[in-house]
């Protein structure tokens, strides 16, 4: 889920201190109508007209609302509950083509800041053809990867058939259907979870954009998928609903797919050297439940079939999306839970990813770059004051726990059968570190 518009004077990377707003000369009647509307929800203690200087303080380091320009800021105390206050003033400002934003006033005295910007977002229809084209391109890419998996499966029983499939993949694309369909189900459920949650809150959103990435560019055949929100999120409840719906829906498909795949995959001595998939807590538990024991042990391992590989990939995608940073789903969930305090995780998570890249697996290098680019900015909703209700707070914590149990410290390892190693990785250590970081954030927030 990408490109959520947001606007806030404090929507800045943690490495920068917020620039204070300064009083500007006011024209007595210029904002009289807006002042009267603001007075319906708050006791105004200060009024700030947005000139060139204060406008820069509001705009700097923001994900700006397209076509909107902040005009005035009212500081004071709300006279209504924040969610009710926002709904009331939004209804009054909509006919005038203004949009309100509520922010905590972090200066002495507390209270809130009501920012009124001119120019409400205009949502235009987009052609679905690019979504359809990317869908079929990704499906073909996944079929190709699935066909290669099928060649390996067939080669273990019938080497001649395996060689024929491997040498003529286009003629045998149908053999890759289990992998392709299973992974498209997981990715599709993930993105449609975001989509339908956004539509439930009457927000404009695009259909999913699937990203094809065939070998040798990717082992999986895809770089995932995303939707684009066309309107700003109303409050932290909406942010949580839309952010958590994707990974939780995807997980509902990934878990049964990986368990069915493991239950139907052969277990025994492995033949030849190759890559070994990494273990998350959830994947390790799935192996124990379906196989009756944890593998690999010595040279005994499960040889994943297409369904098992699709399910494992779905769990990996879920974990990566739930990294609690910036524009990732985990970043949305954490911000909805603890607000601006979520920014304090940027440096620790970035350092942890650097450590993963240097000491565990270079496969994290790509994600390190993406976190560096997208991890600094959060999707701040229009009403950043309203907090989560108990039910949504539970869903947020549950979603972060899903990250802990699906996170894979080492996605792949090289196995050399001749030495018959017992493969072990830090399947517990790093998820526990992630859990401790999240717990520290929650304790600091609610202490």
Image (spheres, rainbow, N blue to C red):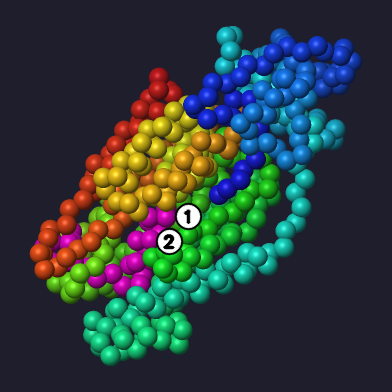
**Callout 1 crowding tier (Cα within 10 Å): few <14, some 14–19, many ≥20:** many
Residue 216 placement (x, y as % from top left): 41, 68
The structure residue drawn at horizontal position 16% and vertical position 65%, both measured from the top left corner, is: 416
Label 2, label 1: how far apart the Cα atoms are: 7 Å
Label for residue 194?
A: none
Q: Nearer the viewer, residue 100 or 26?
A: 26
Q: Which quadrant is the C terminus positioned in?
A: top left
Residue 344 position by quadrant? top left
Label for residue 249?
A: 1
The structure residue drawn at horizontal position 14% and vertical position 72%, both measured from the top left corner, is: 269
Proximity of marks 2 and 1: CB atoms separated by less than 8 Å: yes
Q: Is residue 308 magenta?
A: yes
Residue 389 placement (x, y as % from top left): 52, 32
Q: What residue does disc 2 label?
A: 253
Q: Secondary structure at mark 2?
A: helix
| 413 on left or right of 117 | left
Q: Secondary structure at mark 1?
A: helix
Q: Is residue 50 magenta?
A: no
The structure residue drawn at horizontal position 28% and vertical position 42%, both measured from the top left corner, is: 430
Q: Nearer the viewer, residue 24 or 291?
A: 24
Relative vertical location of residue 443 with respect to residue 308 in this rendering, above or below: above
Residue 239 placement (x, y as % from top left): 57, 40
Number of numbered tags placed on the structure image? 2
Q: Nearer the viewer, residue 328 or 260?
A: 328
Residue 198 placement (x, y as % from top left): 62, 48
Residue 46 position by quadrant? top right
| 114 on left or right of 157 | right
Relative vertical location of residue 110 with respect to residue 276 in this rendering, above or below: above
Q: Which residues are magenta?
A: 294-318
């Amino acid at each position: 889920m990408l490109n959520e518009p947001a606007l806030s004077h404090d929507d800045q990377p943690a490495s920068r201190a917020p620039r204070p707003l300064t009083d500007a000369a006011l024209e007595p009647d210029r904002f009289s109508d807006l002042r009267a509307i603001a007075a319906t929800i708050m006791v105004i203690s200060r009024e700030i007209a947005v000139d060139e200087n204060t406008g820069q303080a509001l705009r700097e380091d923001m994900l700006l609302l397209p076509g909107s320009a902040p005009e005035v800021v009212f500081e004071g105390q709300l006279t209504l509950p924040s969610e009710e206050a926002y709904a009331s003033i939004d209804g009054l400002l909509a006919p005038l083509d203004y949009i309100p934003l509520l922010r905590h006033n972090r200066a002495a005295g507390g209270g809130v800041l009501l920012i009124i910007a001119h120019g409400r977002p205009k949502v235009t229809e987009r052609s679905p053809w690019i979504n359809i084209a990317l869908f079929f391109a990704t499906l073909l890419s996944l079929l190709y990867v699935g066909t290669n998996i099928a060649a390996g499966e067939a080669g273990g029983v019938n080497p001649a058939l395996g060689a024929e499939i491997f040498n003529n993949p286009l003629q045998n694309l149908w053999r890759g259907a289990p992998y392709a369909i299973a992974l498209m189900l997981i990715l599709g459920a993930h993105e449609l979870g975001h989509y339908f949650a956004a539509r439930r809150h009457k927000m404009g959103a695009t259909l999913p954009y699937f990203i094809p990435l065939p070998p040798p560019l990717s082992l999986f055949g895809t770089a995932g998928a995303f939707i684009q929100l066309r309107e700003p999120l109303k409050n932290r409840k909406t942010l949580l609903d839309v952010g958590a719906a994707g990974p939780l829906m995807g997980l509902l498909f990934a878990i049964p797919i990986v368990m069915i795949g493991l239950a139907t995959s052969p277990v025994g001595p492995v033949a030849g050297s190759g890559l070994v998939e990494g273990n998350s807590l959830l994947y390790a538990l799935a192996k124990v439940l379906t196989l009756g024991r944890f593998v690999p042990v010595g040279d005994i391992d499960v040889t994943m079939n297409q369904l098992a590989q699709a399910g494992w990939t779905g769990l990996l995608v879920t974990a990566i999306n739930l990294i609690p940073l910036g524009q990732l789903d985990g970043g949305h969930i954490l911000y909805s839970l603890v607000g601006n305090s979520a920014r304090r995780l940027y440096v620790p998570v970035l350092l942890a990813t650097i450590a993963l890249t240097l000491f565990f697996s270079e496969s994290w290098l790509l994600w390190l770059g993406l976190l560096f680019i997208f991890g600094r900015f959060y999707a701040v909703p229009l009403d950043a004051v309203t907090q989560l209700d108990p039910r949504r707070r539970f869903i947020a914590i549950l979603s972060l726990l899903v990250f802990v149990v699906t996170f894979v410290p080492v996605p792949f390892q090289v196995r050399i059968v001749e030495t018959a190693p017992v493969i072990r990785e830090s399947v517990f250590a790093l998820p526990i570190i992630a859990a401790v970081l999240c717990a520290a954030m929650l304790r600091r927030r609610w202490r």
